[in-house]
Image (spheres, rainbow, N blue to C red):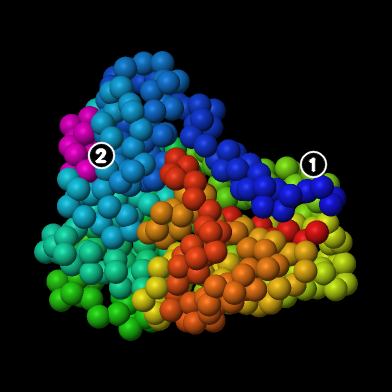
Amino acid sequence: MSDLDPQSTLRRLFDAAVASAMPERLADHLPPPPIGRTVVVGAGKAAAAMARELERVWPGEWSGVVATRYGHAVATERIAVLEASHPVPDEAGGAAARRILEAVSGLTADDLVICLLSGGGSALLTLPADGVSLEDKQEVSRQLLACGAGIDEMNTVRKHLSAIKGGRLALACAPARLVTLAISDVIGDDPAVIASGPTAADPSTYADARAVVAKYGLTLPPAATALLAAEPDETPKPGDARLSHAEYRLIATPQLALRAAAAEAERLGLNVLLLGDSIEGEAREAAKVHAGIARQIAAHGSPVARPALILSGGETTVTLRGKGRGGRNSEFLLSLAIALNGLPGVYALAADTDGIDGSEDNAGALMAPDTLARAAALGVDAGARLADNDGYGFFAALGDLLITGPTHTNVNDFRAILLL
């Protein structure tokens, strides 16, 4: 095992996970062409790449529009690709949402709507409910991103301030058949949570949204607070007959990506401990748990022996306390480095599979046993950087950021800890 290069091995495993979740998988999940029209809509960081792949394999005629993050567009023939802001929405996202609703209006039961969804769709489909402004939605988004709320909690609030999320897009498609093809980036692969569930039944309520606001002590704009209190019209719930025309198909999931990385690791002779795709909570606290497992393996050879690989996915959160730069994966890795304190033979990679950690230009970063020592030699205080939420700045100073550019998929966080 001494001939394994730690950093290239970790990158190889990350690449295997990403490759398993590419949009090419949608060809195996397509419905038959309809008698009437085919309209393609969608939103997410992978939506443009999914649209391009659909154009390559779809046998009939089609038209449509999808929304993706700035910098994530790819060339398509007939499906319009609109770019918008993520994670805080902008007017371009509102224009995209209106274009999507226009595209599915006036359809018949002979027509088919294919909806392409992936992570990021919540911010990219920005159509505020009546009485709520774009500025209101932007302020709500900023507060939700900063408070440490989980993605399901964030989306509960978003859905109840939206005119398109929480199953409302599905209602707009009726009576046409609706088939959603989704790449999951959420724990449990819940269609109601992926991209805030625009084509899925929504079990959450206005009361649930108000509970999230109260839990985190948020001070929403008056119009948003008034709407959540007024409960003007609930989202369609499970069993709602109005959604009988809608079908949902997952084409890629976080667990499948972790299994692909695990299979690659086993081919390299590593003993794999797969912690699962449902790790959540504060990134810095999750890192301490991972560090404890690594120490157990290093000291006692259990629950797996070296050479070992700890794999996990899911979506951690960051409660903003400082003013530094850095997403949840760089924060996880910085906390991990501090917790391990130079433990020999331990290397790690933490990254977002979409290629963007939070709102920065990196996917994540890499850690080695000498990370803290190299930082100290440069005068970079790891503890101070963590307190300032500046994982990006810390790893940038070391030249250890992982920069991939947009991957055109999104199955959430990927964490790999290698013990040689």
At a point 21% along the width and 55% down the height, the residue shown is 90
Crowd tier of the residue under label 1, counting other residues whose Cα lies within 10 Å: few below 14, some 14–19, many 20 or above: few
To which quarter of the image does residue 347 belong?
Answer: bottom right
At a point 36% along the width and 16% down the height, the residue shown is 60
Tell me if I can see residue 300 in this picture: yes
Tell me if I can see residue 238 in this picture: no
Q: What's the CA distance linking mark 1 and mark 2?
A: 41 Å
Q: In this view, does 52 lie to the left or right of 391?
A: left
At a point 22% along the width and 43% down the height, the residue shown is 96
Give coordinates of residue 202: x percent, y percent.
38, 57
Foreground mark, 1 or 2? 1
Q: What stretch is highlighted in magenta?
A: 96-107
| Relative vertical location of residue 213 with respect to residue 93 in this rendering, above or below | below
To which quarter of the image does residue 71 belong?
Answer: top left
- Nearer to us in this view, 161 or 25: 25
Give coordinates of residue 324: x percent, y percent.
40, 73
